[in-house]
Image: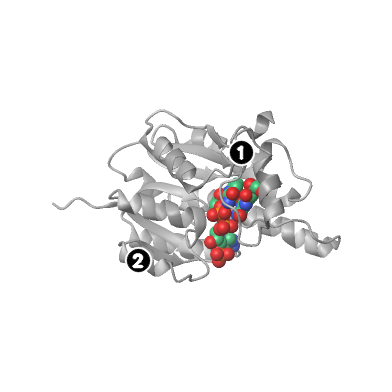
Amino acid sequence: MQKLKSWILITGAGKRIGFELAKHLASHGQNVLISYRTFYPQIEELTKLGIIAVMADFSTEQGIVNFAEQIHHHCPKLRAIIHNASDWQSESTENLTALSTLFDNMMQIHAKVPYLLNQALLPLLLKNDEIPSDIIHISDYIVQKGSDKHLAYTASKAAMESLTLSFAKKYAPHVKVNTIAPALIAFNEQDDETYRLQAQQKSLMAKCGGYPEMLAAVDYLLQSKYVTGSCLTVNGGRHLK
Ligand SMILES: NC(=O)C1=CN([C@@H]2O[C@H](COP(=O)(O)OP(=O)(O)OC[C@H]3O[C@@H](n4cnc5c(N)ncnc54)[C@H](OP(=O)(O)O)[C@@H]3O)[C@@H](O)[C@H]2O)C=CC1
Ligand SMILES: Nc1nc2c(c(=O)[nH]1)N=C([C@H](O)[C@@H](O)CO)CN2
């Protein structure tokens, strides 16, 4: 009887870190399924690699539930779920209604999405042939310091890191659950030279980490049969500066 394939799910992989992760894992023979919200031209590059790309907008509960149903339809079993989807929004207003919406949006994408998807997709993680399977929450080193510009974002990533601990306790030993907490990995197009220089100087290594650092961190957690409930900090020594 033909063995059913196992998949790695990466959320928010239409660009940047998620996109690079999807290409990396697929190029090493892993079946990959991604969620995307905006259809970028490079998503066609992923589908040519055999990656399944499913549109998902996680801003509503229905969007999350619909996506979970899509995953059950596409995947007989899951090797791993990598929660990468994220919105880096800052507090740019003093309007309470706008601040309330910002807070809800941050908690939705960084805490409610992993909270609901991990529970909805657990049956697929448990069907994986080799145990343990994996859940990886991609957080942000800034949780350790707090932020005076991204308060709701940082609080929601802290909630995500708490979910790592709870799901690690709840799902062991069949599923490992870990956090990767990066600092500066990739600049955004709008980042000017002054910002780039200042941002790099915040860490001991005085550089932008780059996508390979995240690929290596994910590879490490996936190959481990023992590490769970941990937070892998990828921050260039920023905590010591
Ligand atoms: N880049 C860096 O230096 C750092 C990154 N990180 C973390 O690493 C991860 C990847 O970072 P990066 O690649 O820069 O992230 P980006 O912000 O570039 O991309 C995040 C992706 O998530 C998707 N997304 C956002 N909101 C939603 C939603 N409501 N529903 C569905 N999809 C959504 C976006 O879709 P769309 O394209 O449609 O907007 C986007 O493709 C994130 O969790 C981030 O917080 C942490 C520290 C540093
Ligand atoms: N979803 C995102 N989260 C974060 C981003 C990003 O581009 N998208 N960028 C950062 C910064 O690189 C920060 O770590 C250094 O200024 C943080 N989170």
Residue 191, can we see it? yes
Label 2 CB-ligand 1 distance < 8 A: no
Q: Splitting the image into 4 quarters, where does residue 175 fall?
A: top left
- Pointer 2 with pointer 1, Cβ within 8 A: no
Q: In x, y percent, where is residue 107?
A: 66, 53
Q: In x, y percent, where is residue 53?
A: 40, 65
The answer to whether residue 233 is left or right of residue 227 is right
* Residue on which the image places disc 1: 162
Q: Which amino acid does label 1 sit on?
A: Ser
The answer to whether residue 55 is left or right of residue 206 is left
Q: Splitting the image into 4 quarters, where does residue 106 fall?
A: bottom right
Q: Nearer the viewer, residue 111 or 186?
A: 186
Rate crowding at label 2 as few (under 14), some (14 to 19) or many (20 or more) other CA atoms within 10 Å: some
Q: What residue type is labelled 2?
A: Thr
Report the residue at 73% width, 59% height from top: 102
Q: Splitting the image into 4 quarters, where does residue 176 fall?
A: top left
The answer to whether residue 213 is left or right of residue 147 is left
Q: Which of 233 and 186 is in front in this view?
A: 186
Report the residue at 37% width, 30% height from top: 225
Q: In x, y percent, where is residue 137?
A: 53, 44
Image vertical order of residue 39 relative to residue 80, above or below = below
Looking at the image, tell me whether mark 2 or mark 1 is earlier in sequence order: 2
Residue 47 marker: 2
Q: In x, y percent, where is residue 75?
A: 33, 57
Kindly report which numbered mark, 2 or 1, lies closer to the viewer in this rendering. Answer: 2
Residue 229 marker: none
Report the residue at 59% width, 35% height from top: 236
Image vertical order of residue 140 relative to residue 4, above or below = above
Helix, strand or loop under label 2 = helix
